[in-house]
Amino acid sequence: MASNKFKGVKEAKTKNSSEYFHPGRYIVQIEAVKATSNYKREEFTVVEMQTIHAFEDSERGVNEHGSEIPLHRAGDSVSYLMKVQSEYYLSDFKTFACAAGDMTAEELTEERCAEIEGDKNPLGGVFVEVLVKQSVSKKEREAAEKEKRAPRAFTRVTWVRQVPPSEVVELAGDGITDLVPNIADLLKAEAA
């Protein structure tokens, strides 16, 4: 039986944003998707990933001091958190799962969601293209102007698509075997 937190996922709309990445365009490899909670007993779904490739022509973000935020480097660990209690949770999860799982919104069920977050880790090892941008809401821009301070940006994450291992090899080059020791097996599975 599926976890109750996915009740209603069929009706949820997909969207292309969330938080906690450096701005840029990346290929990441999913290591795990799992449920967790914090000391306040708030529930989260966390996606743990490794950066495989950063596109150097990516748009960079700036921090509150106006300094450029560097791109993640190949091998950097990255996490993506989705707060279960958020009004956007089902949309965030659905958008992520559809892109990473290479499936349509119609194919995503409560049971499939629970499976994605479960112990079998079906998305572990999957490569995904991610586009991360900084945005400032109109409300924040107006408040910052009024208070004579720099506006605080939020991070918008777009899960673009699942990326085949052959394309990952082309992008990452010679260092891919250090980052993904089983890349030869993944290429064989793709060719089969």
Image (cartoon, rainbow, N blue to C red):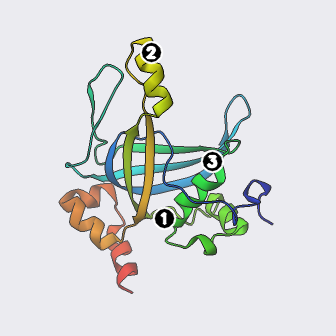
Q: Is residue 135 above or below residue 189?
A: above
Q: Considering depth in this image, is 7 or 140 the residue closer to the camera?
A: 140
Q: Residue at x 66, y 60 (%)?
A: 12
| Dot 3: element | loop
Q: Are marks 1 and 3 in contact (CB under 8 Å)?
A: no
Q: Position of residue 75 (x, y in %)?
A: 32, 47
Marking on residue 88: 3
Q: Position of residue 80 (x, y in %)?
A: 51, 45
Amino acid type at image mark 2? Lys
Quadrant where the C terminus sits is bottom left
Estimate the spatial distance between the alpha carbons at disc 1 and disc 2, rounded to whole Å: 40 Å
Tell me which numbered mark, 3 or 2, is placed earlier along the sequence. 3
* Label 3: few (<14), some (14–19) or many (≥20) C-alpha neighbours in 10 Å: some
Tell me which numbered mark, 1 or 2, is placed earlier along the sequence. 1
Q: Position of residue 72 (x, y in %)?
A: 31, 42
Q: Is residue 168 above or below residue 190?
A: above
Tell me which numbered mark, 1 or 3, is placed earlier along the sequence. 3
Q: Point out the frontmost of discs 1 and 2.
A: 2
In the picture, measured across the screen, residue 94 lies left or right of residue 48, that is: right
Q: Is residue 88 above or below residue 146?
A: below
Q: Point out the frontmost of discs 1 and 3.
A: 3
Amino acid type at image mark 3? Tyr
Q: Residue at x 36, y 39 (%)?
A: 22
Q: Residue at x 35, y 43 (%)?
A: 76
Q: Which residue is mark 2?
A: 146
Quadrant where the N terminus sits is bottom right
Q: Is residue 21 above or below residue 191?
A: above
Amino acid type at image mark 1? Ala
Residue farthest toward the bottom in the current orientation of the protein:
192
Q: Which residue is mark 1?
A: 99
